[in-house]
Amino acid sequence: MAPLIATACIVFLVAALSVYGPGTRSPKAGAHLRDGGSSSVPVPPAQLGNDPVSKLVGVLRRRPWARFLLTTASIGLLVGAIGTIGYPFYTNLLQDRIQSRLDRQFNSDELRQQYLDRNVKVGDSLTRIQIPELDVDVVVVEGITASALRAGAGHYPGTPLPCEEGNVAIAGHRTTYGRPFHSVHQLEMGDEITLVTPIGPCTYRVSEKPFTVSPKEISVVANTPDTPMLTLTTCHPIGSAKERLIIRAELVSSQVRTAA
């Protein structure tokens, strides 16, 4: 989308320059000639062709309101292109700052106790997700609210805590806020995903090929009491929220320590 907006902006700017550029105004009556004389007959403007572009330029030259609209549209597109292209950079910087704070919190004794008490608040550190195949290593927060997901990835409330029995579900951004799940579509069966919790790590292995579902399909995060598994969700296709991309993995090992 950003490249399309930028291209449209350039096209409009070129069109504006063709209207306001040199040669668009006729010499004034009485303009001095090279031999010192003057002419009382205005020189007619250069003739334009009959192609659609030339006709459009002719209309814009004759109608000031059309030139005003063209200029306004050009400026609007330029601002829109800058905003569209610059927004991901802004969110990535914000996510980086949030991750720095979450790193400090993740290693604290206070968070460990909150985790044991199952009392981690929305937006606080919950686990660290590591996907070696994709070079992913980010702290996952509790909750999937818009504010919580500024961290990049969040744990679905109501699903089991990482490494526990059942379906652990985590949502992540694909194009903004560090885009930790940008390339999860590349995961293959057998690839490993590690969740590091305040009380130890566990490892899951991708058990299915990535697949898509409707955003309204919530059964993919439903609990599976007898099957320890991990479900990752993200938007699909890249840059759109039309569908949800799902990655399923099964628990293969755990080093989680008990409260004792």
Image (cartoon, grey):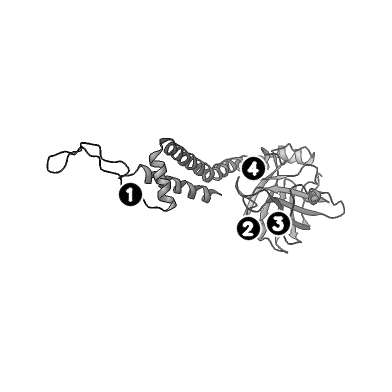
| Residue holding disc 4 | 151
| Residue holding disc 1 | 47
Mark-to-mark CA distance, 4 and 3: 19 Å
CA neighbours of label 2 inside 10 A, class few (<14), some (14 to 19), many (20+): some
**Residue 45 seen in render:** yes
Under circle 3, the secondary element is: strand
- With 192 as the anchor, is 118 left or right in this view? right
Residue 56 % position (x, y): 43, 46
Q: State which tag comes first along the sequence, 4 or 1.
A: 1
Q: Quadrant of residue 13?
A: top left
Q: Decide which of 105, 189 is in the foreground and name it.
A: 189
Identified at 84% across, 55% down, the residue is: 227
Q: Decide which of 156, 33 is in the foreground and name it.
A: 33
Q: Quadrant of residue 204?
A: bottom right
Q: Label 2 is placed on what type of residue?
A: Leu
| Residue holding disc 2 | 134
Residue 166 % position (x, y): 83, 51
Mark in the foreground, 4 or 3: 4
Q: Are marks 4 and 3 in contact (CB under 8 Å)?
A: no
| Residue holding disc 3 | 193
Q: State which tag comes first along the sequence, 1 or 2.
A: 1
Q: Are marks 1 and 2 in contact (CB under 8 Å)?
A: no
Mark in the foreground, 1 or 3: 1
Q: Label 3 is placed on what type of residue?
A: Ile
Q: State which tag comes first along the sequence, 4 or 3.
A: 4
Q: State which tag comes first along the sequence, 2 or 3.
A: 2
Mark-to-mark CA distance, 1 and 3: 68 Å
Q: Residue at the front extreme?
A: 41
